[in-house]
Amino acid sequence: AGATVPPSFEELEESISEVFRQLVASGAHKPIPDRPARALPQDVSAAKRRGDVRVATNIVCTISDDRGEEPRYAGVPISEIIAESYSIGEVICLLWFKTLLPVWATRFIELVLVTAADHGPCVSGAHNTIVAARAGRDL
């Protein structure tokens, strides 16, 4: 009724080839000849003028800036981030908030990451307690 299943995954390629050969031999399938690939344009603006390309790419990333010699997070070169040993909280501040926040804020971000990393029920309770305490609320 239909399916050809090879005895092992290693024999899948040969099984597919055999089914293909049988279909061609029986006339149930006629292979389509390969077409040569089009040559890629060397210049995007020239390809746009010829109509080979519809629009120029305009990808804007608001998180980091990858133009130039090295990536920058909120204007800070990644080499400085590494050389000055920025903490993960400071890097998250640069990426998400586009500025360095005070030390207490970066430490809180790191605390949230540490407590939420496990995702277990006890950890989520501890995480909620910390957030509520920081907000001045009682659980």
Image (cartoon, helix red, strand yellow):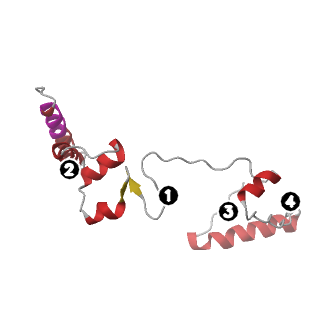
Amino acid identity at mark 4:
Ala
- Mark found first going from the N terminus, 3 or 4: 3
Q: Nearer the viewer, mark 3 or mark 1?
A: 1
- Residue 62's place in the image compared with 52, above or below, is above
Counting from the top left corner in percent of width and height, residue 17 is at 73, 70
For marks 1 and 4, give the one nearer the viewer: 1
Nearer to us in this view, 109 or 61 = 61
Tag nearer the camera, 2 or 1: 1
Q: Which mark is residue 67?
A: 1
Pointer 3 residue: 4
Q: Find disc 2 in the rendering and name its residue.
A: 114
Give amino acid for label 2: Val
Q: Which mark is residue 1?
A: none
Disc number at residue 28? 4
Element class at badge 2: helix
Relative to 92, say whether 41 is above or below.
below
Q: Nearer the viewer, mark 3 or mark 4?
A: 4
Do the residues bearing badges 1 and 4 touch, measured as CB atoms within 8 Å?
A: no
Magenta region includes residue 102: no
The local crowd at label 3, few if under 14, some if 14 to 19, many if 20 or more residues have their Cα within 10 Å, is few
Residue at 58% x, 73% y is: 10
One can see residue 112 in this view: yes
Does 131 appear in magenta?
yes
